[in-house]
Amino acid sequence: MSQIIWIARHANRLDFVNPDWFLTAERRYDPPISDDGVVQAQQLAKRLQREKIAHIFASPFLRTVQTANAVAEVLDLPIKLETGLSEWLNPAWMTEEPERLSTPALAELFPRIDLSYTPRIAAKYPETQEQVRERSGQTARCLAAEFYPENILLVGHGASVLGAAMGLVGEIAKTEVKASLCSLVKVVLQESEWLLELKGDTSHLNQIEEVIRFV
């Protein structure tokens, strides 16, 4: 029996649209999605509505939760917050460990969050590019192979989308996967081998000028 792992990057960020937001933000490394990001997330949900996805996992950052929630609403599924899919905790981007909303606070905003779920993999500040790829790859392997044999969706960030794909299909993902905003990667398990079928599809986005930034 084959298994499909869908891997999506979050929709557009408010601080990409309005860089000044960062200057006064309470949690400056945890921006929400922008207005056009809301549309992107809805389009992603529409793209996935006929796929037989059994579980949704999301990085605990606000933008990934918002993106995952749009899909969860359409598929009528809970959201499991997985720290292994977190943003790259890069000290060149962040002067300190990023502050974000607690899981209970997120659950108040997004009731679909599954409070009984325990994250499998930790993300520790600071980390190198190699470390973010390793922990997001380990997360994808752990969730797919050990705990959830059904079709699943992982919602992460540029670096963790790439790392998750690399964790399944290997180094080929480095050159093949394009983790642009709200892009969709599809990896299929066939006869014990993971195959890359979609490499960062954005055809479901019908407006959108892509912002090329690997965050």
Image (cartoon, rainbow, N blue to C red):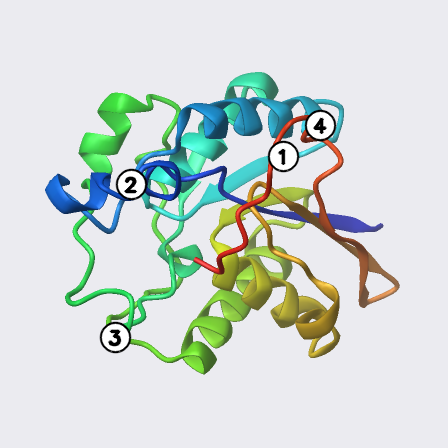
Q: What is the spatial separation of the Cα atoms under label 3 and label 1, in whole angstroms?
A: 33 Å
Relative image position of residue 108 (x, y in whole percent): 23, 23
Q: Is residue 23 above or below residue 88?
A: above
For disc 1, the neighbor class at 10 Å (few under 14, some 14 to 19, many from 20) is: some
Q: Is residue 22 above or below residue 74?
A: below
Is residue 78 visible in the rendered image? The answer is no
Among numbered discs 4 and 3, the one appearing first in the sequence? 4
Q: Amino acid at mark 3?
A: Pro
Q: Amino acid at mark 1?
A: Ala
Q: Mark 2 touching mark 4, by CB under 8 A?
A: no
Among numbered discs 2 and 4, the one appearing first in the sequence? 2
Q: Which residue is at a point 74% across and 48% down the rendered structure image?
A: 4
Horizontal relation, residue 57 to residue 202: left or right? left
- In this rendering, which labeled residue sits more in front, label 2 or label 3? 2
Element at label 3: loop
Q: Which residue is mark 4?
A: 47
Q: What is the spatial separation of the Cα atoms under label 2 and label 3, in whole angstroms?
A: 19 Å
Q: Which residue is mark 1?
A: 54
Is residue 161 visible in the rendered image? The answer is yes
Quarter of the picture containing the C terminus is: bottom left
Label ID, residue 159: none
Q: Which residue is mark 3?
A: 126
Among numbered discs 3 and 1, the one appearing first in the sequence? 1
Q: What is the spatial separation of the Cα atoms under label 1 and label 2, in whole angstroms?
A: 28 Å
Horizontal relation, residue 157 to residue 104: left or right? right
Relative image position of residue 174 (x, y in whole percent): 66, 73
Q: Which residue is mark 2?
A: 31
Among numbered discs 1 and 2, the one appearing first in the sequence? 2
